[in-house]
Image: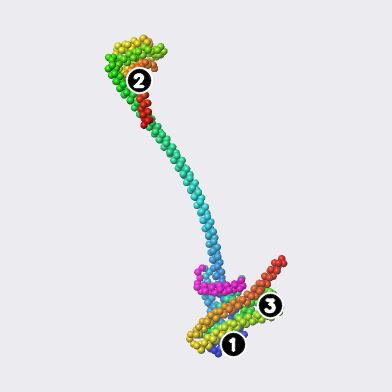
């Protein structure tokens, strides 16, 4: 395929089918592939789940992953980890599988497209106020933007936007650049060296998935903890006045 | 960098769809399985705790029962020991009684044997003395011993005091005027006449005399009438001899 050639900068450019404004490109195709692998794999493994003492090794594998995700979330939110597992877990699994599948010849990670990373970052951008408002209410969430006073409102907004942009560009830059580096290395020094770079690429891919998921959780948790602090202060004040 | 907004929205949709599908097929199920297993483990632990508690209770119960049994055993053992002791004492008492009885019988037997022996000894001694005395008298004089005995008898009759004579007279009349004279030897006619004469002279007339030979009366003669008697025999001397002899022998026996 042409997508790994040096003159292609992104899988977005590989149009498979289009009609009017509807475009099906390589990014969407590989995204569906990753989705299919995840969903079908999960379905097959969780078809015969056992809650007994003896479980299958695949179930163990999944339980370990979910337990790690739950543990990480619990460390930050202190309580109600299961509420955030679908978002954070899906971010991690999707990015991780996308990045790891790079090892398969012909596969291009959807995360090497900035459209995908921007979409994921946007989801996080929306999720932060969503969880904050659903937990503490709109007033407390909006009030947080005016802390310590209204002058800080633009800075808060800019912070939200800039960290979303950072999420987008960090993931995209890492994965895309890696693919390009490997492509260039293949042209310059074939055989052994690109293999080492591929291994390094796998490590970077997993780390990037972890970083993306953890940062998302940190943003959500910061919104939640800020609200919690407000709550605690109010409760303390009520206690003193009583 | 150019961003295709349709692809951007499609990716958001794809991500939300994936989130939904994974929540349904992965997280929900896995978390449920894990929670179920945790609940089961907790339930098993609780059950194990409960069973442990029950086991402890049962152990305490058995311990108490064991203690009670031991106490009961101790009591029964004491009772049995006391009963055995009582039985032993009873048996000992019984044995002692039996031994006492045997001892008493043995002592009776000993006394009887003792008596028999001395009776026999007396008899033998008397006979021997009689023979010896008779021989001695025969050697010393020409007078037969019987005569001497009869003479002694007659002398006794003659020397009876008044009171004794009256008693004998009454006894003769009360006994149908019959007098029995027993002797160890046969009394000759002249002797019988002398006896009769002395009796009539000293006591009374009008009675018949019957002479009987009785070897038991050792070297003696004896008048018996209704509970009274006039007699002389070696028995008197012999009895004294035997008594002194018995005393001597008993002293010897105790000494040994």
User: In x, y percent, where is residue A99?
Assistant: 54, 81
Chain containing mark 1: A
Q: Is residue A74 magenta?
A: yes
Query: Most prominent secondary structure in the magenta stretch?
Result: helix
Find disc 2 in the rendering and name its residue.
B237
Residue depicted at 54% across the width and 86% down the height: A181
Q: How many numbered circles does the render carry?
A: 3
Q: Is residue B167 left or right of residue A221?
A: left
Determine the secondary structure under disc 3.
Answer: loop
Real-space CA distance between mark 2 and mark 3, rounded to the nearest whole angstrom: 162 Å
Q: Residue at x 66, y 74 (%)?
A: A226
Residue A116, picture quadrant: bottom right
Question: Looking at the image, can residue B214 be seen?
Answer: no
Element under disc 1: strand
SS at badge 2: helix
From the image, tell me which residue sits under label 1. Answer: A19
Give the camera-side residue of B118 and B230: B118
Compared with residue B141, is residue A116 higher up or lower down, i.e. above or below? below
Query: Which residue is identified by label 3?
Result: A145
């Amino acid at each position: 395929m042409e997508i790994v050639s040096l003159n292609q900068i992104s899988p977005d450019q590989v149009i498979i089918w289009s009609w009017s404004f509807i475009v099906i490109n390589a990014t969407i195709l590989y995204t569906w592939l990753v989705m299919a692998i995840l969903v079908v794999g999960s379905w097959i493994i969780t078809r015969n789940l056992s809650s007994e003492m003896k479980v299958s090794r695949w179930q163990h594998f999944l339980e370990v992953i979910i337990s790690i995700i739950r543990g990480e979330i619990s460390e930050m939110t202190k309580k109600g980890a299961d509420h955030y597992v679908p978002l954070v877990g899906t971010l991690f699994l999707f990015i991780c599988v996308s990045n790891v599948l790079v090892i398969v010849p012909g596969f291009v990670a959807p995360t090497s497209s900035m459209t995908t990373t921007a979409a994921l970052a946007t989801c996080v951008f929306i999720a932060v106020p969503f969880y904050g408002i659903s937990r503490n209410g709109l007033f407390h969430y909006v009030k947080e933007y005016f802390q310590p006073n209204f002058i800080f409102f633009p800075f808060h907004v800019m912070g939200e936007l800039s960290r979303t942009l950072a999420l987008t560009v960090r993931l995209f830059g890492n994965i895309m650049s890696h693919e390009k580096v490997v492509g260039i290395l293949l042209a310059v020094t074939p055989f052994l060296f690109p293999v080492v770079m591929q291994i390094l690429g796998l490590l970077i891919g997993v780390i990037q998935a972890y970083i993306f998921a953890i940062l998302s959780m940190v943003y959500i948790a910061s919104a939640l903890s800020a609200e919690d602090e407000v709550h605690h202060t109010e409760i303390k004040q009520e206690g003193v006045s009583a | 960098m150019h961003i295709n907004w349709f692809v951007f929205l499609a990716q958001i949709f794809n991500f939300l769809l994936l989130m939904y599908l994974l929540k349904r097929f992965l997280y929900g199920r896995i978390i449920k399985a894990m929670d179920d297993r945790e609940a089961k483990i907790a339930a098993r632990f609780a059950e194990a705790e409960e069973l442990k508690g029950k086991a402890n209770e049962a152990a305490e119960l058995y311990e108490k029962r064991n203690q009670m049994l031991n106490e009961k055993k101790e009591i029964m053992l004491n009772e049995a020991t006391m009963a055995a002791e009582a039985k032993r004492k009873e048996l000992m008492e019984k044995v002692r009684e039996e031994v006492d009885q045997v001892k008493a019988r043995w002592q009776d037997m000993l006394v009887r044997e003792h008596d028999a022996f001395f009776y026999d000894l007396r008899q033998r001694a008397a006979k021997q003395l009689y023979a010896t005395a008779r021989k001695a008298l025969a050697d010393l004089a020409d007078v037969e011993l019987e005569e001497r005995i009869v003479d002694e008898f007659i002398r006794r009759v003659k020397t009876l005091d008044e009171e004794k004579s009256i008693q004998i007279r009454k006894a003769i009349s009360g006994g149908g005027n019959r007098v029995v004279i027993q002797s160890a030897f046969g009394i000759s006619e002249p002797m019988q006449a002398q006896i009769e004469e002395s009796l009539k002279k000293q006591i009374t007339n009008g009675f018949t005399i019957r002479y009987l030979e009785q070897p038991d009366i050792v070297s003696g003669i004896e008048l018996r009438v209704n509970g009274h008697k006039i007699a002389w025999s070696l028995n008197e001397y012999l009895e004294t001899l035997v008594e002194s002899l018995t005393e001597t022998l008993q002293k010897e026996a105790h000494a040994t």
